[in-house]
Amino acid sequence: MIRGRRAGNLVFAAAAAVAVLGLGAVPASAATSLTVKVTSGGSFTATASKTVLTDHGVSVTCTNHKSTHASQGSGKIANGSYSGAAPVQVGTVAKLAFSNCSGPLGKVTTVLTSLPYTLSVDSKTTKSGDTDGIIAGTNVAVSMTGCSFTVTGASPGYYSNSKHELVMTTTGKLPAKPLETAQLTVSNVVGCASLVNDGDHPTFVSTYTSSRKVVIKSS
């Protein structure tokens, strides 16, 4: 009987320990769902007067020159409601180009592949009408004298309903806490004097003004 009681006590203690551990465990967080409504949508063009890609102090800057914009893109954001786990895709960037670019070693050329890129919403819209967004699927080959590399991945930013601008920023604070992490990654580095390396996560900063007054409301 004593042995039976001890065995029973051990079983009870083990069960209690399992229960405590179970109560203390934190379940994996589920992805946040968003409902996004787009109005005044359709085909658009977007232009930027300046873009800056920076990695460990090495910057590639593109600027306007005469009638050529530093960067110009086009795509489509269709009207309608979109629901799902963040980030929620609402459009595509079918064409994108960078012009008049220079770096520490002079003129820089860029070649973009894997288009179209996706345009997704990654937060609820703030009271001021700003919504975090992500351009994903990017693939840009960058080359200059003595240095070449490829930048792929996703670039974060936000869209302003009042200004109809897409502000790309990996250095500044976004208007809302992003629901997913977006980042660019460097690969295929040749040369670059070890200033740019495979696996680096460069920053990209620019402001694109849309030709279409798209309104995005996410909740």
Image: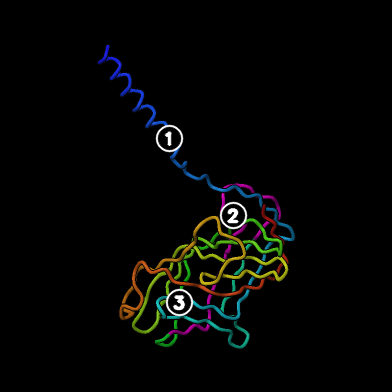
Instruction: Identify the mark nearer the N-term, 1 or 2.
Output: 1
Label 2 crowd (10 A; few <14 / some 14-19 / many >=20)? many
Amino acid residing under circle 1: Gly
Picture coordinates of residue 107, whole percent (x, y): 44, 86
SS under mark 3: strand
Which residue in the structure is indicated by mark 3? 54
Pointer 3 or 1: first along the chain: 1
Residue 133: say if magenta: no
Residue 33 vs residue 28: left or right? right
**Mark 2 element type:** strand
Residue at the far top: name it: 1
Residue segment shown in magenta: 77-103
Q: Nearer the viewer, residue 28 or 1?
A: 1
Residue that badge 1 annotates: 22
The answer to which of 11 and 147 lies nearer the viewer is 11
Residue at the spot 60% in from the left edge and 70% down from the top edge: 167
Report the number of discs.
3
Q: Residue at x 46, y 80 (%)?
A: 60
Vertical side of 117 occupied by 210: above or below? below
Q: Quadrant of residue 49?
A: bottom right
Residue under label 2, please give it. 89
